[in-house]
Amino acid sequence: MSGIGAIGERLRTQDNRCTAEPMFCVQEFHKDIGYDADYTDDVVWIDMSNGESEEVEPESPGAEKFGYKERWETVMVAFTEAGCNEYIRLNGHNHSGKLRIFTESFRRCPEMIAIREMLMRKPPDFDAALKKAWKAYEDKHSYSEFASGFRAGFDAGRGVAK
């Protein structure tokens, strides 16, 4: 199963991690180095003598003390955890930091909640039904006219194009 119907099925059956209206985020770990070491307890020693910045032991020649902050940056958001796993599978090699999946909420975001609810209402065979109905009507209507009528029919619970 793929497409919109599959997304709806995953939304209905996935573990939401005890989160209302969940969105799943791929986050990348970053260690930002360069803060004044006098104003943080998190410090690292860097040797920049060869033109590169390399983390070294404090007693190493050329070692300079810097403060750092660790943070997780959201790089992609999906409706399902499976969507995040697929993103990591396809694009994980493009990220230099460690990746994780973190759950946030669409709470107080009516647009995203409405889209999420619409996806959950669609039956698993929505994509197949759309393609079949389009094939029957393609000579008579533009796709945009057809699709809006078809979606309205599904929303009304009939599962057929108007």
Image: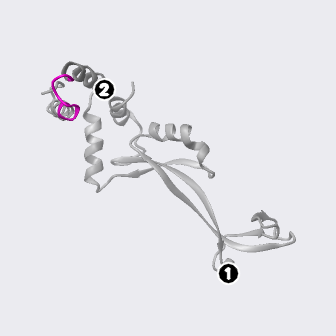
- Residue farthest bottom in this picture: 38
Q: Which is nearer the N-term, disc 1 or disc 2?
A: 1
Which quadrant is home to the C terminus?
top left
Numbered mark located on residue 90 in the image: none
**x, y percentage for residue 148?**
18, 35
Q: Identity of the amino acid at label 1? A: Asp
Residue visible at 55% across and 37% down in the picture: 89
When the figure is inspected, residue 88 is found, relative to residue 96, above or below; the finding is above
**x, y percentage for residue 79?**
38, 42
Q: 119 and 162: which one is in front?
A: 162
Do residues under tags 1 and 2 come within 8 Å of each other at their CB atoms?
Answer: no
Residue visible at 22% across and 31% down in the picture: 143
When the figure is inspected, residue 76 is found, relative to residue 123, above or below; the finding is below
Q: Is 6 on the left or on the right of 69, as rendered?
A: left
Numbered mark located on residue 127 in the image: 2
Which quadrant is home to the N terminus?
top left
Residue placed under numbered mark 1 in the picture? 38
Question: Which element is circle 2 on?
Answer: helix
When the figure is inspected, residue 153 is found, relative to residue 94, above or below; the finding is above
141 in magenta: yes
Q: Is 123 on the left or on the right of 102, as rendered?
A: left
**x, y percentage for residue 6?**
36, 29
Foreground: disc 1 or disc 2 = 2
Question: Residue 40 appears in which quarter of the rendering?
Answer: bottom right
Q: Which residues are magenta?
A: 138-146
159 in magenta: no
Q: Identity of the amino acid at label 2? A: Asp
Q: Is 140 on the left or on the right of 102, as rendered?
A: left
